[in-house]
Amino acid sequence: MIKTKIFMQGFGKPCIDEQINKWIAKHPDYIIVDIKLQSSVVDDIDQYWVCRDALVIYQEYEK
């Protein structure tokens, strides 16, 4: 069965690479099918914010 997990960067969270690598290390039995990265720019009144997220598509080893 294909499953997904989303990771978001910013607001005190570490970079997406670190989050994904830690998650993979905790779940060595998952097969990573694909990773979709996205960046968005939010235009606030006085500043711009860059929001990054990643959608990891994976499946578990079938036993």
Image (cartoon, rainbow, N blue to C red):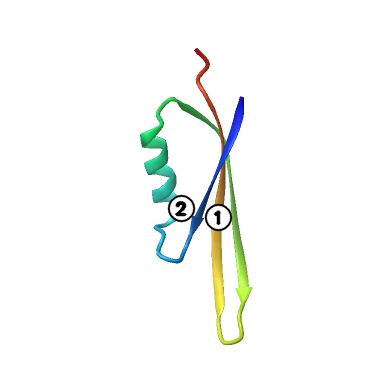
Residue 26, quarter of picture? top left
Label 1, label 2: how far apart the Cα atoms are: 7 Å
Picture coordinates of residue 16, whole percent (x, y):
46, 53
Residue at figure coordinates x 41%, y 40% from the top left: 23
- Residue ranking furthest to the bottom: 46
Image quarter of residue 20: top left
Mark sitting on residue 53 = 1
Discs 1, 2 touching: Cβ within 8 Å: yes
Label number found at residue 29: none
Which mark, residue 16? 2
Residue at coordinates 40% horizontally, 28% vertically from top-left? 28
Residue at horizontal 61%, vertical 80%?
Answer: 44
- Please tell me which residue lies in front, 4 or 48: 4
The relative height of residue 22 versus residue 12 in the rendered view (above or below) is above
Q: Is 56 drawn above or below residue 59 in the view shown?
A: below
Query: Residue 14: x and y, percent?
Result: 39, 57
- Measured as percent of width and height from the top left, residue 19 is found at 41, 48
Three-letter amino acid code at disc 2?
A: Ile
Q: In this view, does 36 lie above or below 29?
A: below
Determine whether, in the image, residue 27 is placed left or right of residue 60. Answer: left
